[in-house]
């Protein structure tokens, strides 16, 4: 065994350096995200997804460089994590667009494939070191020969292991389809504008799905052209590019680049701040948003917060200021009342007043802004 181990070369080249940079940067970024994010936020899921990817490509780096020979017991130990990459990215997109938490009770089926695969490989995980060394040699250096293994050892795990590549492709394709459905669903009901923020959650999710799809195609091409793990370092290099691109966008969105960021009036925004869900719940309670006297100050007082913090949170979540956010909710109710027989005795102006607008002109202006048509035209289109 020692003779064969000594024959395994330790290679450090451009590919290994790029993979190492990607792993280190990814782990650093994932810890920053996990440390800075609130437990209920979607960004926590993004942090976990990134950390899982880094563990997988750390294994790829060790195998490619030959450093795995010092810790052979861990060879192929991250295969379960590979099957978790697609689900965790999907969880992030789901939580970001649906604004619903991920719970094991509801989403446990997504863990079935990784769990079942892990159980099928139990015999390999407990196998003698000779078996794991032979597995590594078969993937990277089959010219060095193999070690003998006791005849009593069972290779029953190999049948499932031989299908591992197809499992990866199936997992990626399946979750790309699910994530794409979420993005199209979000697009159909998208009410916020991206003019006030550089990248809104819809655009970020859409771009994630596009990168996700490109990754699937790239992995498929690697699998076609390389046997075993021979081309995994190319996937690792692509992951490094994705990691640094993600880092660039996260850093570019940082308040560090805003004017007068040290004296920012939103400096009170902390990890213990209110959530956007608190705003939604408060403003929707008893249809409070239909009250024409509803103001940003009144909302902040009800939340035991301050106007700057509430305004910042609304803007970051929706891309709208408080008035547009309030009016958008009022317009939804007004649209129903304009075509409802229950309110047919009211004029258009009266319906506008009933949903909280102080004047006919204010109602018409807000209605056109959020629907791109006038109330009267909207009624004609809906009633034929």
Image (spheres, rainbow, N blue to C red):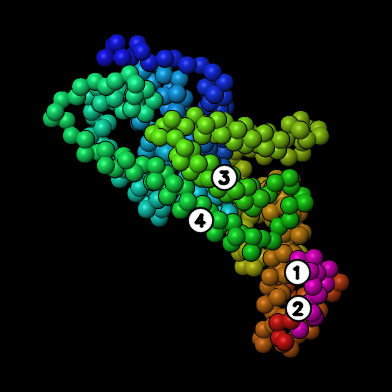
**What residue do we see at 69% from left, 79% from top?**
337
Image quadrant containing the N terminus: top left
Dot 4 surroundings within 10 Å: few (below 14), some, or many (20 or more)? some
The circle drawn on residue 371 is: 1
Q: Residue furthest left?
A: 152
**Label 2: element kind:** helix
Q: Earlier in the sequence, mark 1 or mark 4?
A: 4
Residue named by callout 3: 214
Q: How many numbered circles are shown?
A: 4
Mark 3 residue element: helix
Position above or below: 332 against 236: below
Instruction: Name the one closer to the observer, 275 or 140.
Output: 140
Q: Which residues are magenta?
A: 364-380
Q: Are marks 3 and 4 in contact (CB under 8 Å)?
A: no
Residue underneath mark 2: 378
Label 3 vs label 2, nearer the camera: 3
Badge 2 or badge 4: first in the primary sequence: 4
**Is tag 3's residue or tag 2's residue first in the polypeptide sequence?**
3
Q: Are marks 3 and 2 in contact (CB under 8 Å)?
A: no
- CA gap between label 3 and label 4 equals 13 Å
Which numbered dot is residue 177? Answer: 4
Secondary structure of residue under mark 1: helix
Asked whether the beta carbons under mark 2 and mark 1 sit within 8 Å of each other, the answer is: yes
Residue 141 appears left or right of 94: left
Let me know if residue 158 is in the magenta part: no
When the figure is inspected, residue 347 is found, relative to residue 21, above or below; the finding is below
Q: CA distance from mark 2 to mark 1?
A: 9 Å
| Distance (Cα) linking label 2 and label 4 | 35 Å
Q: Compare residues 66 and 328 and report the one nearer the observer.
A: 66
Specify few, some or many for label 1: CA neighbours under 10 Å numbering under 14, 14-19, or 20 or more: some
Contact (CB < 8 A) between labels 3 and 1? no
């Amino acid at each position: 065994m020692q003779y064969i181990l000594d024959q395994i070369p330790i290679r450090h080249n451009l590919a290994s350096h790029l993979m190492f940079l990607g792993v280190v940067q990814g782990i650093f970024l994932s810890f920053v995200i996990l440390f800075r994010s609130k437990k209920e936020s979607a960004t926590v899921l993004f942090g976990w997804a990134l950390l899982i990817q880094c563990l997988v490509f750390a294994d790829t780096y060790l195998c490619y460089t030959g450093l795995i020979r010092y810790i052979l017991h861990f060879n192929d130990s991250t295969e379960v994590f590979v099957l978790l990459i697609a689900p965790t990215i999907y969880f992030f997109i789901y939580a970001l667009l649906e604004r619903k938490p991920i719970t094991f009770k509801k989403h446990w089926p997504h863990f079935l494939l990784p769990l079942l695969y892990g159980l099928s490989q139990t015999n390999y995980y407990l196998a003698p070191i000779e078996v794991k060394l032979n597995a590594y040699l078969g993937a990277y250096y089959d010219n060095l020969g193999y070690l003998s293994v006791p005849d009593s050892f069972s290779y029953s795990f190999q049948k499932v292991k031989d299908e591992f590549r197809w499992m990866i492709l199936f997992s990626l394709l399946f979750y790309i389809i699910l994530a794409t459905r979420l993005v199209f669903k979000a697009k159909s009901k998208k009410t916020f504008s991206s003019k006030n923020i550089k990248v809104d959650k819809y655009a970020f999710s859409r771009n994630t799905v596009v990168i996700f799809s490109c990754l699937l195609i790239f992995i498929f091409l690697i699998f076609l052209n390389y046997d075993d793990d021979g081309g995994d370092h190319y996937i690792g290099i692509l992951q490094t590019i994705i990691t640094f691109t993600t880092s660039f966008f996260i850093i570019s969105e940082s308040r560090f680049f805003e004017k007068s960021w040290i004296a920012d009036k939103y400096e009170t925004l902390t990890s213990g701040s209110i959530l956007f869900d608190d705003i939604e719940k408060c403003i929707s309670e008893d249809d409070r948003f239909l009250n024409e006297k509803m103001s940003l100050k009144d909302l902040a007082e009800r939340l035991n917060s301050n106007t700057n913090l509430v305004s910042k949170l609304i803007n970051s979540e929706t891309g709208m200021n408080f008035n547009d956010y309030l009016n958008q909710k009022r317009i939804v109710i007004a649209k129903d009342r304009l075509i409802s027989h229950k309110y047919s005795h009211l004029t258009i102006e009266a319906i506008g007043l009933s949903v909280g607008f102080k004047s006919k002109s204010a109602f018409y202006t807000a209605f056109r802004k959020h629907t791109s048509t006038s109330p009267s035209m909207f009624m004609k289109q809906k009633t034929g």
